[in-house]
Amino acid sequence: EFDFTAEAAKINEFRELFETHGLSDRVAVPVVIEDLSTSEVLVMERVRGVKLLSVLNRARRRGRRPLVPAAAAKVHVDGGIGWDGVFDTMFKCWSVMLLRHGHYHSDPHPGNFIVAKDGRLAILDWGQTQVAPEAYRLHLCRLVVSMVAEDYPKIAEEVRLHSQVQLERPTTEALAALCYAYFDTRPTPLAEVNMMDLNNSPFLQNRITQNTQEGFFTIRSVFLLRGMMATCGVTSSMVEAWEEDARAVLRASG
């Protein structure tokens, strides 16, 4: 975020990406005011609404589930009722960015989302993005398809052949469990564990001898989304929402 010209270019890039994939009716990316922006100053049109962080914090203080703003519930209803629809939109955004485009927002914490007055989900702070190389994208696409099918032997084989992750005993069960914890949002026994903490991992009896560097920001994104979902009472699966894009990318790759 030291050169706001680069961030402005990314904002424009991702707005066009969402428009191309038919998401602009559900997702907003702030418009850069080019004439007022420089490498040191970034000026954007104001997005009016409420930060998702404020919605979640208010609900926590009251000890109850957060309510979905009525406009948002209406805009995102094709993806599900209430928060299910909002998170389905998030899933689709990250699917398009990561799997199809190979460049994605890598800091999806609740302070970087605004539920706009028109119901759309505004995504902020495009300074932190990551490029996903083609080999990694195809690896993720194959994992997604196998995870949706709950084909544990295929999941394990994919990890053994194409992942940087290594276990002392890379059993099918251990590798599959790790993948669901790393790359899916549905609750699992490993979901709330810091899988990057090799010293306090549940895998002490079957140690992670090498973790994934290329997948770090993807995994971090999944954990951030899962944390928001837990507060909202959402338990849906992100890999299921990613399946269509994953299959399309694999078909295109031959």
Image (cartoon, rainbow, N blue to C red):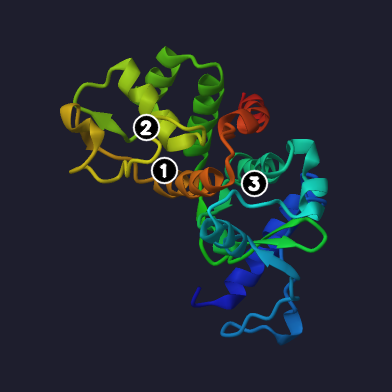
Residue at 19% x, 27% y is 206
Is there a contact, CB below 8 Å, between mark 2 and mark 3?
A: no
Q: Quadrant of residue 120?
A: bottom right
In which quadrant is the C terminus drawn?
Answer: top right
Q: Amino acid at mark 1?
A: Gly
Residue assigned mark 1: 215
Q: Amino acid at mark 3?
A: Met
Residue assigned mark 3: 90
Q: Is residue 229 above or below residue 189?
A: below
Residue at 35% x, 46% y is 213
Cα–Cα span, label 2 and label 3:
25 Å
Cα–Cα span, label 1 and label 2:
9 Å
Q: Earlier in the sequence, mark 2 or mark 3?
A: 3
Residue at 74% x, 75% y is 46
Mark 1, secondary structure of its residue: loop
Is there a contact, CB below 8 Å, between mark 1 and mark 2?
A: yes
Residue 58's spot in the image, x, y percent? 58, 62
Cα–Cα span, label 3 and label 1:
19 Å
Q: Earlier in the sequence, mark 1 or mark 2?
A: 2
